[in-house]
C-alpha cells in the first residue's frame, strides 16, 4: 500500500543541509578508508598500526574541535582497560623499531623511555639467528594521502635528540629517518653488520602482518572469516554474473534484430506473391497477342503465295509470246530474244530460290512480315520488268514490220536499235544487281530482327517478375533502390552478429549452447537463403 501511495507522489527532495551532512560524512570517512587500505596491503606489518591510528586520531581532532571528540580520541588511543597489556606493549615496541616513525608517532601520555628499555630487553632475549623476512615492498604513497602526509609533517617537526641512550638503540635513534616511500627491508639489511640484534628484532616485527584477512572481511557485520578459495569463488561468480548480463544484452539485441528480419521477410514474401500474380497476367496477355499475330502472318503468307502464282502464270504467257515472235523474226532478232529468255529464266530461278528460303525459315512475327514486304517489292519489280518487256516486244514488232517494208535500207537503223536494246538490257542487269543488294540487306535486317526478338523475349521474362507498381520508370527505380537498401541492411546486420559472436567466443573461450542459440542459427540460415533468392531474382 505504501508503494502504491508513493507512486503518484513527487520524488523526495534533498535539501542543502542534507548535502552538507553528506559531504561532511565523506570527509570524515576518507581517512578511515585510507588507513584500512594501508593495513590491508600485502606489504603491511604490525609496526604500522600505532602510527596510522595516531595520525587518524589527530585528523579526527582537527575535524571535530570539541571536548567530546578529544576525549573519545584519547580513549581510542589509550585502548580498552580489558585489553592485554603485553599485546599493546608489543605493538608500541614494533612502532618504535620502525625507522619511518621512531618516537614521532606516539601521543604525549606514552613514556618513550620505558619503550626504549623494553626494546633493549627484547634485543637481549632475541635469538641472534635471523629469521627470513618476507618481501614487504610497498607501493609509494602519494602526497595527497592525508594520514601519511600528517605523519611526515610530524616526524619532520621533531628535532634530533642530542642526549640518546648508548648502544645499538642509541645509534639507531641517532640515525637519520628514511622516507615514507622507501623499503624498510632494504634499510635493515644494510644495517645488519652495524646492529645485528636490533636488525633481527626489527625484521621479525616487519614479517608479522597486522591482520590475517582483508579489510572488507574485517569490517563485515557477519564476522565470519572466509578462506581464500571462497573469496576467489566469489570473485569468479561476480565475473560470471557480469558476463551473463552481457550475454543477455546481446541476446536481447539479437532478438530485436531477428524481429526486424522477420518483418522484412514478410514484406519480401508479399512482394514475391505480387510478382507471381503479375507474371501470370503477363503470360496470359502474351498468349492472346501471340495467337492474333500468327493469324495475321499466315494471311499475309497466303496472299504472297497467290501473287507469286500469278507472276508465274504471266511469265509463262510471256514466254509463249516470245516463242511466237522468234518464229516471225529474223536471226539478229532471235539472238536478242534468246538473251531475254535467258534473263527471264534467271529471274525465275531466283524466285524459286527465294521461295525455298521462305519455306525453310521458321515462322516468326518480325521475319515473316519482312518476308512479305520483300515479296511485295520483288512482285512490283517483276511487274515493272514484265511491262518493260512487253513494251520492248511491241517496239520490236513495229521495227520488224518497218524493216520488212524498207528492206536493206533500214538495216543500219535496225542495228542501231539493237544497240539501244542491248543498252536497255544492261540497264536491266544493273537493276537486277540492285535487287540482289536489296535482298542482301533484307537478309541482314532479318538477322537483326531475330536478335531483337531474342532481346525482347528476355525483356518479357524480366517484366514477368516486375510488380504492378513498377510499371513506370519511377516505380522501377524506387523498387530497385528499396531492394538494394534491404540487401545492404541484411548484410550489415549479419556482419554485426558475426562480430558479436566472435567477441563473445574470444572473451570467454566457450560456445553458447543455450535454447535461444539454435533458433538464432536457424533464423540466420533462413535469412541467408532468402538473400540468395533475392540475388537470383
Image (spheres, grey):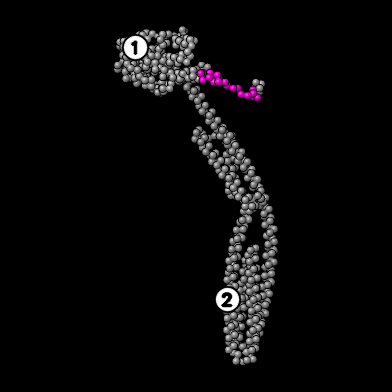
Callout 1 secondary element: helix
The residue that mark 1 highlights is 123
Q: Residues within 10 Å of mark 1 (few under 14, many from 20)?
A: many
* Mark number, residue 430: 2
Q: Looking at the image, which residue is at 67% across and 65% down?
A: 297
* Res. 527 visible in picture: yes
Dominant SS type (magenta): helix
- Residue 197 shown in magenta: no
Query: As displayed, is residue 45 above or below residue 428?
Result: above
In the image, 494 versus 226, the foreground residue is 494
Q: Looking at the image, which residue is at 60% across and 63% down?
A: 449
Residue 236 placed where, x, y %? 50, 27
In the image, 194 versus 409, the foreground residue is 409
Q: Which residues are magenta?
A: 6-25
In the image, 536 versus 416, the foreground residue is 416
Does residue 413 appear left or right of residue 193 in this picture? Answer: right
Callout 2 secondary element: helix
How many numbered markers are drawn?
2
Q: Looking at the image, which residue is at 57% across and 84% down?
A: 419
Amino acid at each position: 500500500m505504501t508503494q502504491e501511495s508513493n507512486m503518484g507522489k513527487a520524488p523526495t527532495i534533498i535539501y542543502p543541509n542534507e548535502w552538507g551532512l553528506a559531504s561532511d560524512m565523506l570527509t570524515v570517512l576518507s581517512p578511515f578508508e585510507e588507513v584500512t587500505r594501508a593495513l590491508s596491503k600485502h606489504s603491511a606489518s604490525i609496526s604500522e598500526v600505532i602510527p596510522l591510528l595516531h595520525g587518524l586520531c589527530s585528523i579526527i581532532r582537527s575535524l571535530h574541535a570539541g571536548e567530546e571528540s578529544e576525549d573519545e580520541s584519547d580513549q581510542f588511543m589509550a585502548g580498552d582497560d580489558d585489553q592485554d597489556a603485553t599485546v599493546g606493549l608489543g605493538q608500541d615496541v614494533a612502532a618504535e623499531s620502525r625507522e619511518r616513525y621512531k618516537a614521532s608517532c606516539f601521543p604525549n601520555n606514552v613514556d618513550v623511555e620505558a619503550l626504549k628499555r623494553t626494546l633493549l630487553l627484547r634485543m637481549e632475549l632475541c635469538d641472534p639467528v635471523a629469521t627470513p623476512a618476507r618481501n614487504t615492498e610497498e607501493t609509494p604513497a602519494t602526497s595527497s594521502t592525508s594520514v601519511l602526509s600528517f605523519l611526515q609533517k610530524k616526524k619532520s617537526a621533531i628535532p634530533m635528540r642530542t642526549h640518546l641512550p648508548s648502544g645499538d638503540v642509541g645509534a639507531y635513534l641517532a640515525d637519520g629517518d628514511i622516507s615514507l616511500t622507501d623499503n624498510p627491508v632494504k634499510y635493515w639489511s644494510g644495517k645488519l653488520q652495524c646492529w645485528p640484534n636490533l636488525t633481527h628484532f626489527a625484521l621479525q616485527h616487519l614479517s608479522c602482518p597486522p591482520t590475517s584477512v582483508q579489510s572488507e572481511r574485517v569490517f563485515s557485520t557477519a564476522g565470519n572469516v572466509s578462506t581464500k578459495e571462497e573469496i576467489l569463488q566469489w570473485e569468479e561468480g561476480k565475473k560470471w554474473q557480469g558476463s551473463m548480463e552481457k550475454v543477455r544484452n546481446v541476446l536481447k539485441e539479437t532478438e530485436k534484430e531477428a524481429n526486424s528480419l522477420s518483418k522484412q521477410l514478410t514484406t519480401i514474401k508479399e512482394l514475391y506473391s505480387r510478382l507471381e500474380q503479375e507474371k501470370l497476367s503477363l503470360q496470359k496477355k502474351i498468349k492472346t497477342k501471340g495467337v492474333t499475330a500468327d493469324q495475321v502472318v499466315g494471311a499475309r503468307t497466303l496472299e504472297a503465295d497467290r501473287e507469286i502464282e500469278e507472276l508465274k502464270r504471266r511469265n509463262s504467257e510471256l514466254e509463249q509470246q516470245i516463242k511466237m515472235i522468234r518464229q516471225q523474226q529474223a536471226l539478229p532478232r532471235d539472238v536478242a530474244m534468246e538473251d531475254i529468255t535467258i534473263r527471264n529464266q534467271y529471274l525465275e530461278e531466283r524466285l524459286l530460290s527465294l521461295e525455298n528460303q521462305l519455306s525453310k525459315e521458321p515462322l516468326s512475327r518480325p521475319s515473316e512480315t519482312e518476308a512479305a514486304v520483300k515479296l511485295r517489292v520483288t512482285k512490283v519489280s517483276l511487274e515493272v520488268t514484265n511491262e518493260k518487256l512487253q513494251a520492248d516486244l511491241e517496239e520490236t514488232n513495229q521495227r520488224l514490220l518497218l524493216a520488212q517494208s524498207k528492206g536493206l535500207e533500214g538495216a543500219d537503223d535496225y542495228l542501231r536499235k539493237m544497240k539501244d536494246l542491248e543498252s536497255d538490257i544492261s540497264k536491266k542487269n544493273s537493276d537486277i544487281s540492285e535487287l540482289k543488294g536489296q535482298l542482301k540487306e533484307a537478309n541482314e535486317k532479318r538477322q537483326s530482327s531475330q536478335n531483337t526478338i531474342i532481346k525482347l523475349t528476355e525483356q518479357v521474362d524480366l517484366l514477368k517478375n516486375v510488380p504492378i507498381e513498377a510499371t513506370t520508370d519511377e516505380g522501377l527505380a524506387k523498387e530497385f533502390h528499396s531492394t538494394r537498401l534491404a540487401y545492404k541492411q541484411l548484410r550489415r546486420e549479419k556482419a554485426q552478429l558475426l562480430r558479436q559472436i566472435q567477441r563473445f567466443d574470444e572473451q570467454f573461450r566457450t560456445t553458447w549452447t543455450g535454447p535461444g542459440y539454435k533458433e538464432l542459427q536457424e533464423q540466420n540460415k533462413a535469412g541467408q537463403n532468402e538473400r540468395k533468392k533475392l540475388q537470383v531474382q
